[in-house]
């Protein structure tokens, strides 16, 4: 620097000239000034005139107001110095001041002229011209502040001195006044931007003060130093300094302000230097136009009022007085010569222990007073009054208290006595005092003093050590103590000292806060910074209590302490850029310490939202800080601004970094005008791009860390990252769009980017995709919430309230409609500006809000840069202007406030603006993509992914139902998933569909049919959900057609095989059809209720007409709701009775019901009610039906007739009395129509006639009818019905036979034998039924026409049903057997239908007996026994039929898939339900029938199989292999589909069997899997290769495809199956490969050359392979060892046999490989090895496996089809043999040797064995495959790596007997050889 250094290293320069003295201030100059005799213009003495009440005598009411005014003046100075007229506020302030300077409004002060001035004026000598050619006006101008210069230049204020002369101006005066105006011109030229085209002097009147005389030149000792330095100039700017001209003086007396000449060297020695005062002057703190206070300035010394000055003086005196007392007391602690210590010192000090020595420590109250005094002195700016040496001494005193903390143990011990606790409590008080001392120490350091001796690293380290000690030994244990935990004694101890602990913790927090401030203001060592980071991080991750009762300090009190730690960490992050990565790593590695429950995690309360995690707030704050300039950079920028503001500092001394983007802080107007848009944009990019990119990089770093950890963990696992990621995401979503946390959007955007990458990666696992879909659903919901929030908030804005609101309302509509233009969102007066202004208005030194503001501005600039890339040239000026403004806002956080005014932004406006910004950013714009990914995932191959996608879509629809209105693609995806192969996906799809229908009921017309289809789904859960949706549709929809279809679908579930589904269906109907009308029974004559009931009756009629299946189920439903088991049986009965009454009214007049149903439909519906409960009808109602049985003329009448007869049949027995006339009329009508009725009607008429006869007792009419019918049949017994001429006779006999059968079944005519014997004298029996059988049986012979045999057999069957004893007759059984032997399907169906009717009747009889409760007493006990246990003819007939005809029935069931087979299956099921045969007899057939393509057959067989398995599991499992073979034969011969799986989708045909096994014992299931694998094993000596293809090959394919496509629900099942397959391949395949090499490939092994191994195919080798003997085998050749030349031709039969064996074994290996890929076994093992680093626990093997993504059955299916063609030609057979040898010889899979032990343990546990060691002799085997998966006797390991092929094994030396034991002590032996010398495989 130029010049010399003055006092305290400060240069006194003016225009480059060194001043030999320090210029005085005004206050100092007034002491020797002539103005000292005049009352000075001091506001402390003379208050400013005010029109208001005199509330105070000061200009500034408070110190805060003074700071505000100073801040405003600094801003005006900055604007005037640089930007001129670009600031509207500056122009407006200028205009206000010019109005205040109006002469008419100014008070004129008249001063008497002192005589001494006149004398001096007269004697004043001439002075030389100014130095450097500067005019007086220029020099005066330089003395003013920038704003004062602008006021002076813009305002013409004339002035005059009062003289005794007349006020008339002389020409000289006018000339001088003109010269004064000319002198203003250069000043105006210096600020062209500050002057508008029309000057303010012209725009308004100027203030004039008449000048009476020309000023005279005052004496000045040195002309070269007329002007003082800048600081003094600012101090004296308010005093007009006039430099007299060098013209000869006049005698006129003129008042003037005289500045004395410079003092001589001898005179200067009389003055004292005040460095601290000079520092204040140089800093500009006492200047009237002071600059804005910089961030690195600590103290302020404002011009304060009298009261404030008194307070500041008092604070200074108090501090210094207290320090003096303390020092005096310390000195008195030293004993005097007599050894006596002063009592005064003892009062202020206490004794403390530091190490092993005793040291004096300030008493707690004194320490508190000292800290308070220091704080007050700092706050009033008088801390500089205290000498530095005193502060150093104070620090030493405080250091003793701080150092004493290290020796204080604060840990609570177990079993402490009261004395121990009291001593511990005293240590707490001492610790609190030590923390108070630490607070004083740090406060002194952070006060901004410049003396280096105050900043001791040792003192700071002592504070940090003490802080760590207190944290570890007290704060953390107290925070983690819980009342509910085992160690609750410590909690009680802590609670007893809650007050002391609270004080201690509060002091700890204050010290930590001050440390954060210190590190922000002062450069300290890296170790200190790291220590504060450590303490803060550790404190942040201490788990707070979940509730107040479990917290010693209180949840929120400790949360405040954690918040203080967060603030300290954030300050370090903002101040030290090099520490940011370390801070991030510390936070991330500590995340697993966080609580994973949402309630305990979210304890950081937001001002305007839900609570979030403290760490979530910390991460967002750090990201926001990353997007803002660091504190150090802002401090450097402040220095640069000082240079640019005109201070005479050398620019080379600036601390600005050459690489800093803030090299150019501000741009002058000339530069701005000449700058083009590209340059402005580039400069903005230079400033903002590093900030934005740094923040974005940090966000991606954090997100990547959390997502990777979450992918390797589970929600239920030990690692919490999966739950934490959910919590973080929810937290960021909660604050999305918040003004204070704008970084949430960047976090979510980074997370979304990672999630999209996971979804688009085809190799991503299903759990990863599920996590991604889950989080994407949360994000989509959050975006929808934000949109809803904006819609609601905009309504609260009044467009007439302000211009901002008027702009926000239409902009919000555009943003929500995705139509907002970029320029609207980026506009300088737009929402981003509003958010910045809103944050700035709330910024009261809040670093959080400052970080938010900095982030918003950086994001604003970044978006502007992006928009500029696609902008048009015509908008270049707009982009340029905004770019310059944003650049200035980034580099100077105060620029916007100083430069531009803006209307006050309300809270609502600020929040709406922030939300609009968030909606315009990439995250919200990605909503469509999120939704598209969710929809696409609904079509995934993975069921769990589909289900998760559906649930995520549900979340979005709940938030924004309008998604459904944007097209049909959403609904199409949902409906497609509703028909998915996976039950999980179908269930989720229905759940989503239910939500859609709730939100948009109009969609019901489009989708109800799909829901109806799902009501019959195979999965129980899907059926139940579909039923729930159908119920909702039924209750909402008004369409009768839809209601009817829904009711029909629900009715079918009444007979569901699952009882819970059937119960749900019954309950649903009761709620829909009965419950709504219960109130009608209470309120009589309710018109609305009656109308509703009529509509319900009409709906029931419509439903009943949908088919016969509906009628039967509807009957069962009504019986259920009317039964005693129903809770509302009585109310339901009354509702049904009212419905019946309405139906009868509608029979008379169908206008009574809506839709006017026909009589046929009404009567058909009445039959349902009649069957359900006959008591619903009355006799009068039945009489109304009489006409309908008399008129039978056409088909319609027949339907009506049938319905009426059914009603009569069921209702008549329940009525107590009838008029005989009515009954006789009905009887006559029925008898007259018997001859022309069909089967269905005849059955009902016969029953009805017998019921009427029971009342009328005129049985003779029925007897005569029966006799007549039988006589007609008997008389035609010799007729040759084969003769074509006997057609009429044949038809007549057929009619008679049918009538005889129905009458024989319905009527008991045994009491009237005489009539029959009279007609048939040859009959000697007593049973009329026997007579009927006697007459009909001859007509069953094969010689009779087929149609006649059908009728006769049906009639015999009906008679036998009523009289079961007839089943035992020889002629009857012979007739039935003849039917079965002839295999006549039609006749078999008739016989089976008869059996079915009989068995149904028997089951019903048993159920009826069971309905009588055992505990009902003696009154009903006999009845129950009579019904259930009384021996009848039925008891002999049932087992007789089952034993005699079961074989035929089974054969019929397995021969076809039509109705005959269905009838046979129903009979089989009934026989099993009654327990008439052994379960083994029907079990295999039921398993085979489960695979039937006829759904009805398969369902019946599955239900009965499941029942038998649960009752006889152990016994039944032995039949499963026979059942599998029978199922194969059934599929091959009957279904003509020998494959083991169905395609499109791929599903096992034996899936029902495996589903039953999954519900049973695990060991039974494992044995089944092992046995099924063993069925594929082969014996070369018995292998039959005949057939095309061979049956053995087809059966192997059947078994393998079933094993491949079973739905395994446990990992150990798959492992066990794979192990068994590997055993077969290695044990059986080895000798096969050996034979191929020797016979086909002509490769000689070493063993053969030694004369060994010649008996490989005699069964011995195979036996060795399966029993695990120790006979070793030689290594197989590799692929390169096989001969390359063409082999010698082999016998075709032999080659075909070998090829068949290779095909079967290869098929087995393909299945094994597919299973491992499909279920991701290798990944499961790798994960277990990585996570647990130990053996996989047995419980892990019981977990459900997860299918791997991208693995479908198509590839496996193609491989199997290719294998099936291996036997077509000689070449293909040879190729298959060669490939198999390669398969065994070459291992193409990767195998990690270290997994060996783990894998063996896995296989062992999968087999169901948990013991650590077993001998080979104790291992059980099933067939040729060991049941245990732990065996090692094969060439390959039982490895779990994908595509593992058998490995060769080292053979043991000949004669070796015992295999070496493995690490578990278990012999490694098995089929095909043994382990090598080290007990491992090669």
Image: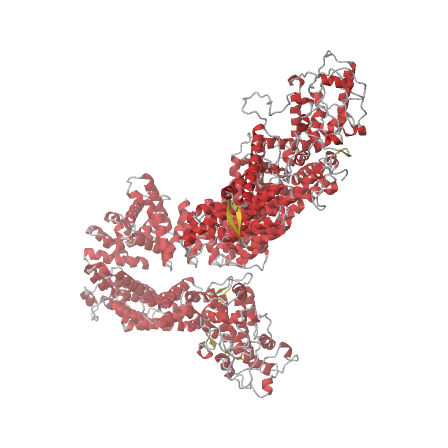
Image quarter of residue 1512? bottom left
Quarter of the picture containing the C terminus is bottom right
Which is more toward the observer, 538 or 1862?
538
Is residue 550 shown left or right of residue 1797? left
Image quarter of residue 1776? bottom right
Query: Measured from the top left, where is residue 854 in percent x and y?
Result: 62, 42
Q: Residue at x 30, y 63 (%)?
A: 1403
Query: Measured from the top left, where is residue 305 in percent x and y?
Result: 59, 28
Is residue 1638 shown left or right of residue 165? left
Which is more toward the observer, 277 or 1307?
277
Decide: is 1008 above or below 273.
below
Decide: is 741 above or below 1701.
above
Evaluate whether residue 1044 shows in this view: yes
**Residue most toward the top?**
166
Number of numbered labels in the structure image: 0
Which is more toward the observer, 220 or 1089?
220
Evaluate whether residue 1285 shows in this view: no
Decide: is 995 above or below 167.
below
Say how the picture is coloured. Answer: secondary structure
Quarter of the picture containing the N terminus is top right
**Residue most toward the bottom?**
1651
Is residue 1231 shown left or right of residue 1106? left
Query: Measured from the top left, where is residue 1246 in percent x and y?
Result: 26, 59
Query: Measured from the top left, where is residue 1593 in percent x and y?
Result: 51, 74
């Amino acid at each position: 620097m130029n010049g010399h250094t003055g006092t305290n290293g400060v240069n006194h320069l003016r225009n480059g000239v060194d001043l030999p003295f320090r210029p005085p201030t005004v206050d100092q100059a007034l002491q020797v000034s002539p103005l000292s005799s005049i009352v000075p213009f001091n506001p402390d003495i003379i208050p400013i005139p005010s029109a208001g009440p005199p509330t105070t005598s000061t200009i500034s009411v408070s110190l805060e107001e003074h700071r505000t005014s100073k801040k405003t003046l600094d801003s005006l100075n900055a604007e005037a110095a640089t930007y001129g007229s670009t600031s509207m506020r500056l122009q407006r302030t200028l205009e206000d001041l010019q109005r205040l300077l109006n002469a008419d409004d100014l008070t004129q002060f008249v001063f008497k002229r002192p005589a001494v001035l006149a004398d001096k004026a007269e004697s004043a000598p001439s002075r030389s011209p100014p130095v450097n050619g500067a005019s007086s006006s220029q020099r005066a101008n330089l003395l003013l502040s920038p704003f004062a210069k602008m006021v002076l230049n813009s305002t013409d204020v004339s002035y005059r001195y009062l003289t005794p002369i007349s006020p008339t101006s002389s020409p000289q005066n006018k000339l001088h006044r003109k010269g004064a105006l000319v002198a203003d011109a250069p000043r105006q030229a210096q600020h062209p931007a500050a002057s508008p085209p029309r000057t303010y002097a012209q725009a308004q009147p100027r203030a004039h003060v008449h000048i009476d005389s020309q000023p005279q030149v005052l004496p000045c000792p040195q002309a070269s130093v007329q002007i003082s330095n800048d600081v003094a100039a600012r101090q004296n700017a308010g005093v007009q300094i006039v430099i007299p001209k060098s013209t000869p003086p006049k005698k006129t007396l003129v008042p003037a302000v005289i500045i004395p000449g410079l003092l001589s060297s001898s005179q200067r020695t009389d003055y004292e230097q005040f460095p601290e005062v000079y520092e204040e002057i140089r800093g500009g703190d006492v200047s009237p136009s002071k600059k804005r206070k910089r961030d690195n300035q600590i103290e302020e010394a404002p011009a304060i009022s009298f009261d404030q000055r008194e307070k500041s003086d008092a604070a200074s005196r108090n501090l210094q007085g207290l320090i003096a007392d303390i020092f005096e007391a310390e000195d008195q602690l030293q004993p005097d010569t007599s050894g006596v210590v002063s009592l005064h010192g003892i009062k202020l000090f206490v004794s403390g222990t530091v190490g092993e020595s005793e040291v004096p420590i300030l008493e707690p109250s004194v320490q508190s007073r000292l800290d308070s005094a220091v704080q007050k002195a700092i706050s009033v700016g008088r801390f500089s009054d205290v000498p530095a040496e005193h502060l150093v001494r104070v620090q030493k005193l405080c250091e003793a208290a701080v150092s004493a903390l290290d020796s204080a143990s604060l840990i609570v011990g177990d079993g402490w006595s009261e004395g121990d606790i009291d001593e511990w409590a005293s240590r707490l008080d001492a610790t609190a005092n030590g923390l108070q001392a630490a607070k004083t120490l740090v406060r002194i350091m952070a006060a901004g003093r410049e003396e280096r001796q105050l900043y001791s690293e040792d003192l700071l380290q002592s504070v940090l050590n003490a802080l760590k000690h207190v944290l570890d030994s007290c704060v953390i244990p107290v925070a983690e103590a819980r009342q509910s935990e085992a160690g609750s004694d410590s909690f009680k101890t802590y609670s007893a000292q809650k007050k002391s602990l609270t004080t201690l913790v509060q002091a700890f927090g204050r010290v930590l806060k001050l440390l954060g401030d210190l590190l922000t203001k002062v450069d300290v060592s890296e170790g200190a910074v790291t220590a504060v980071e450590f303490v803060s991080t550790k404190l942040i991750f201490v788990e707070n209590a979940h509730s107040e009762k479990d917290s010693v300090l209180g949840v929120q009190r400790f949360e405040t302490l954690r918040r203080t730690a967060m603030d300290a960490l954030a300050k370090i992050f903002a101040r030290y850029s090099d520490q940011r990565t370390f801070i991030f790593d510390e936070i991330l590695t500590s995340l697993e310490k966080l609580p994973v429950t949402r309630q305990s995690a979210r304890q950081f309360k937001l001002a305007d939202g839900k609570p979030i995690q403290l760490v979530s707030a910390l991460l967002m704050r750090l990201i926001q800080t990353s997007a803002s300039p660091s504190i150090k950079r802002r401090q450097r920028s402040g220095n640069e601004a000082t240079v640019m503001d005109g201070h005479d500092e050398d620019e080379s001394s600036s601390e600005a970094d050459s690489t800093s983007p803030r090299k150019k802080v501000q741009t002058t107007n000339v530069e701005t005008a000449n700058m083009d848009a590209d340059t402005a944009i580039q400069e903005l990019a230079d400033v903002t791009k590093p900030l934005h990119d740094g923040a974005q990089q940090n966000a991606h770093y954090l997100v990547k860390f959390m997502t990777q950890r979450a992918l390797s963990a589970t929600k239920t696992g030990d690692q919490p990252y999966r739950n934490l990621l959910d919590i973080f995401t929810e937290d960021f979503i909660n604050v999305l769009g918040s003004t204070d946390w704008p970084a949430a959007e960047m976090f979510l955007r980074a997370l979304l980017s990672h999630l999209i990458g996971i979804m688009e990666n085809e190799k991503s696992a299903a759990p990863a995709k599920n996590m991604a879909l889950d989080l994407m659903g949360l994000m989509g919901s959050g975006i929808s919430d934000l949109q809803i929030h904006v819609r609601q908030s905009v309504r609260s804005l009044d467009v007439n309230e302000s211009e901002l609101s008027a702009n926000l309302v239409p902009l919000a509509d555009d943003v929500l409609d995705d139509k907002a233009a970029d320029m609207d969102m980026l506009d300088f007066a737009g929402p981003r500006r509003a958010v910045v202004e809103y944050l700035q208005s709330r910024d009261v030194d809040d670093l959080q809000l400052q970080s938010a503001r900095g982030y918003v501005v950086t994001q604003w600039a970044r978006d502007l840069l992006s928009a500029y890339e696609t902008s048009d040239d015509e908008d270049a000026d707009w982009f340029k202007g905004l770019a310059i403004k944003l650049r200035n806002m980034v580099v100077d956080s105060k620029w916007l406030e100083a430069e531009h005014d803006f209307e006050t932004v309300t809270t609502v406006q600020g929040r709406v603006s922030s939300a609009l910004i968030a909606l315009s950013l990439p995250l919200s714009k990605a909503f469509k993509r999120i939704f598209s990914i969710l929809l696409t995932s609904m079509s995934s191959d993975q069921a769990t992914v589909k289900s998760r996608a559906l649930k995520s879509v549900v979340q979005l629809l709940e938030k924004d139902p309008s998604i459904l209105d944007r097209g049909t693609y959403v609904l199409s995806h949902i409906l497609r998933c509703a028909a998915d192969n996976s039950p999980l996906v179908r269930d989720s799809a229905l759940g989503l569909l239910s939500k859609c229908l709730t939100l948009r009921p109009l969609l019901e017309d489009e989708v109800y049919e799909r829901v109806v289809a799902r009501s019959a789904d195979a999965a129980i859960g899907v059926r139940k959900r579909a039923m729930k949706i159908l119920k909702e549709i039924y209750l909402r929809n008004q369409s009768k057609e839809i209601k009817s279809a829904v009711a029909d679908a629900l009715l079918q579930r009444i007979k569901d095989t699952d009882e819970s589904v059937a119960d749900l269906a019954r309950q649903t109907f009761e709620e829909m059809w009965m419950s709504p009308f219960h109130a009608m029974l209470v309120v009589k004559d309710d018109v609305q209720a009656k109308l509703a009931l009529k509509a319900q009756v009409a709906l029931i009629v419509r439903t009943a007409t949908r088919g016969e299946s509906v009628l039967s189920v509807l009957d069962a439903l009504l019986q259920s709701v009317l039964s005693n088991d129903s809770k509302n049986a009585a109310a339901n009965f009354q509702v049904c009775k009212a419905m019946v009454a309405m139906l009868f009214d509608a029979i008379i007049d169908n206008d009574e019901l809506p839709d006017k149903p026909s009589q046929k439909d009404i009567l058909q519906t009445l039959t349902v009610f009649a069957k359900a409960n006959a008591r619903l009808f009355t006799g009068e109602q039945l009489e109304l039906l009489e006409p309908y049985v008399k008129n039978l003329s056409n088909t319609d009448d027949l339907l009506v007739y049938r319905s009426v007869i059914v009603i009569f049949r069921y209702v008549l027995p329940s009525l107590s009395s009838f008029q005989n006339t009515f009954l006789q009329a009905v009887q006559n009508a029925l008898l007259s129509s018997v001859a022309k009725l069909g089967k269905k009607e005849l059955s009902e008429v016969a029953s009805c006639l017998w019921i009427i006869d029971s009342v009328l007792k005129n049985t003779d009419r029925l007897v005569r009818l029966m006799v007549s019918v039988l006589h007609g049949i008997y008389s035609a017994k010799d007729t040759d019905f084969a003769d074509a001429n006997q057609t009429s006779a044949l038809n007549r006999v057929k009619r008679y036979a049918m009538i005889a059968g129905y009458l024989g079944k319905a009527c008991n005519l045994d009491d009237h034998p005489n009539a029959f014997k009279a007609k048939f004298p040859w009959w000697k029996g007593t049973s009329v039924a026997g007579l009927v059988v006697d007459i009909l049986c001859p007509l069953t012979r094969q010689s009779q026409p087929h149609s006649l045999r059908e009728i006769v057999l049906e009639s015999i069957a009906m008679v036998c049903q009523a009289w079961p004893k007839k089943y035992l007759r020889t002629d009857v059984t012979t007739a039935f057997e003849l039917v079965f032997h002839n295999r006549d399907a039609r006749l078999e169906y008739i016989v089976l239908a008869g059996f079915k009717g009989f068995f149904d009747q028997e089951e019903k009889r048993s159920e009826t007996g069971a309905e009588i409760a055992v505990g009902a007493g003696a009154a009903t006990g006999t009845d129950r026994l009579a019904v259930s246990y009384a021996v009848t003819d039925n008891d002999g007939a049932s087992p007789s039929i089952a034993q005699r005809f079961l074989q035929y029935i089974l054969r019929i069931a397995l021969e076809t898939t039509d109705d005959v087979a269905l009838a046979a299956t129903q009979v089989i099921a009934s026989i099993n339900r009654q327990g008439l045969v052994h379960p083994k007899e029907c079990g295999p057939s039921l398993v085979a029938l489960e695979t039937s393509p006829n759904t009805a057959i398969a369902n019946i067989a599955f239900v009965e199989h499941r029942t038998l398995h649960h009752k006889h599991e152990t016994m039944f499992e032995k039949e499963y292999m026979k059942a599998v073979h029978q199922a194969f034969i059934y599929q091959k011969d009957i279904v003509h589909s020998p494959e083991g799986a169905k395609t499109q989708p791929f599903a096992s045909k034996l899936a029902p069997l495996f589903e039953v096994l999954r519900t049973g014992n695990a060991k039974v299931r494992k044995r089944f899997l092992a046995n099924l694998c063993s069925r594929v094993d082969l014996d070369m000596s018995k292998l039959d290769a005949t057939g095309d293809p061979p049956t053995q090959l087809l059966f192997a394919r059947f078994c393998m495809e079933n094993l491949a496509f079973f739905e395994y629900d446990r990992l150990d099942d798959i492992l066990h199956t794979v192990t068994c397959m590997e055993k077969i391949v290695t044990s059986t395949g080895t000798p096969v490969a050996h034979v191929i090499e020797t016979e086909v490939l002509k490769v000689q092994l070493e063993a053969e050359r030694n004369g060994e191994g010649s008996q490989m195919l005699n069964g011995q080798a195979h036996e060795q392979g399966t029993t695990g003997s120790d006979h070793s085998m030689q290594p197989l050749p590799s692929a390169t060892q096989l001969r390359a030349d063409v082999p010698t031709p082999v016998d075709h039969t032999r080659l075909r046999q070998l090829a068949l064996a290779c095909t079967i074994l290869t098929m087995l290996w393909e299945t094994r490989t597919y299973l491992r890929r499909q279920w991701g076994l290798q990944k499961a093992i790798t994960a277990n090895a990585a996570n647990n680093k130990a053996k996989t626990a047995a419980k892990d093997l019981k977990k459900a496996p997860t299918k791997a993504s991208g693995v479908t059955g198509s590839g496996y299916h193609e491989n199997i089809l290719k294998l099936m063609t291996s036997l077509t030609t000689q070449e293909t057979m040879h190729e298959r043999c060669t490939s198999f040898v390669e398969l065994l010889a070459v291992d193409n899979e990767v195998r990690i040797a270290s997994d060996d032990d783990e894998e063996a343990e896995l296989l062992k546990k999968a087999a169901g064995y948990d013991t650590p060691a077993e001998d080979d002799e104790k291992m059980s085997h099933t067939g040729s495959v060991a049941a245990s998966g732990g065996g090692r006797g094969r060439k390959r390991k039982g490895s779990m790596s994908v595509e593992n092929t058998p490995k060769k094994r080292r053979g043991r030396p000949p004669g070796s007997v015992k295999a070496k034991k493995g690490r578990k002590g278990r012999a490694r032996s098995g089929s095909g050889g043994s382990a090598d010398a080290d007990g491992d495989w090669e």
